[in-house]
Image (cartoon, rainbow, N blue to C red):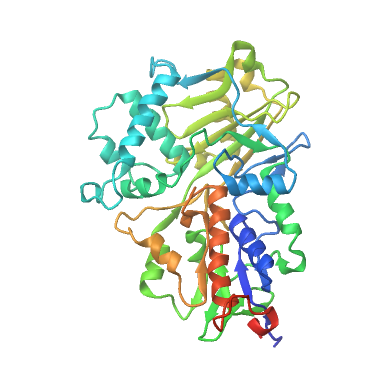
Amino acid sequence: MTAPVATGVVIVGAGFAGLAAAHALKEAGIDFIVLEARDRVGGRVESMVNGLGERLDTGGQYFCDGMDSVIGLARAYGKSWRPGLFGGRTLIQPPGFSTATTDDLFTRSTAIRDRINGFDPGDPSIAGLSVRAWLDTQGDADDAKAAFLGAIEGLWCQPTDRLPLWYLVSNDRRITNEVPELQYFLGETMHSLAEDMAGGLGGRLRLGMPARRIERTPGDVTIITDAQTFSARHVIVAVPPATARRIDFVPPLPTDLAAALLAWESGRVVKMVIRYDRPFWRDSGLSGSVVFLDPPGLYACDSSPGATRATITFFVGGAVVDDWHPLGRDAMRAKALAQLAAALGPQAATPLDVALRDWTGDYWSGGAYSDTIMDPEATSAEDVLLAGAPRLNFACSELSPSYPGYIEGAIVAGRAAAGRVIAELGYRRERSEPVPVKERLY
């Protein structure tokens, strides 16, 4: 039997959390290896070439002021900014559902969100309540409720009749931006930023190597893949919780840790990037943004990276995916184009190209944009995962103290996990300087 490859730390997953952890370890001078199951990096951030030969983001894409980690990396790698939202009128669909202006509707639906954020996650008055059950007790107008539910289902990609209210409160208070979350995207694709980060890791990144089994002993950790075995002092599991629980842990995880992993479910989202010959909607003073109140969870916006590449991105998130996903890709495209044609005009029905990415049940990520706690009783699940176990650390956007569920959150969480490992490995004998790598690891 081939001897295990020895290193200081093994990172499982090369999404932004894993990549951020890897760079933090690299800067600290600690040996590591990154194992990625896919044949690419980025995790829930990816790109594809559409039918016109253009590379575009089909996963996570947007960022905004306040997301300092993303902005810092984008600047460091020389990326170009593009506006994520364009001037003009935002439409409310379907016609007649609401007579309000978009500004008025946004103000009233935001007031609902602000009211929720006035709760403490541990408030006994909201224990066991879903978001929708709580909303049903409120006296807001139907259009404001519909706009709020649509935003929640679109962002959290889960049905609001099951999403625990306490979890939304806990999660939402860590999202602190004062500008729209779709403020910017990168002209070169967000996925290119992940590829650039991976490029600096050299042979320490191993693609196509899913971690099937993690064995912990008092002295080290063994990580077993289909092709190779690795031994390390620590392991950072940098994949979503619902994916992490598919790993075989030996010995079995402590009861509370195993239960914490089971509390999460992956979101459901379909993303379509739709190309037109020109941004015809701007001729009528429209921004290209469309807020759909019925069904909730649909949203469209202008994501044109330049004047010659007119693009609408169409999102399907939450419970509506349960209706759309079984229909197949062609039917989903047709439904999206019909929705856009009803809103923007008949020209929307005849695009140049439609690139569709259905993240529902994705094998390696579980879904998108993030996993959510769907067990109303699992109020300690995040804290338990953050605590991990000896030699075992978890790092994912869901656990971030800021912007959980976003690329920013993944970077913050990855760096934090690396910091915990660095503190464990790098400072010994009450020295103020890090112990040399060879002395530290061997």
Q: Where in the figure is residue 244, as x and y percent of width and height?
A: 51, 64
Q: Nearer the viewer, residue 35 or 181?
A: 181
Which residue shows up at 58% across the image and 71% down it? 422
Residue 153 in which image quadrant: top left
Image quarter (top left, top right, bottom left or bottom right) of the C terminus: bottom right
Which residue shows up at 56% across the image and 49% down it? 408
Q: Is residue 229 above or below residue 158?
A: below
**Residue 325 appears anywhere in the view:** yes
Which residue shows up at 35% across the image and 35% down it? 114
Q: Where in the figure is residue 302, as x and y percent of width and height?
A: 61, 27
Q: Where in the figure is residue 400, as x and y percent of width and height?
A: 48, 55
Which residue shows up at 62% across the image and 58% down it? 20
Q: Nearer the viewer, residue 56 or 349?
A: 56
Residue 51 in which image quadrant: top right
Residue at the far front in the pictured view = 432
Q: Is residue 411 above or below residue 203?
A: above
Q: Nearer the viewer, residue 241 or 383?
A: 383
Image quarter (top left, top right, bottom left or bottom right) of the N terminus: bottom right
Q: Where in the figure is residue 152, as x and y percent of width and height?
A: 41, 38
Q: Is residue 107 above or below residue 360?
A: above
232 vs 118, left or right, is right
Q: Is residue 372 above or below residue 432?
A: above
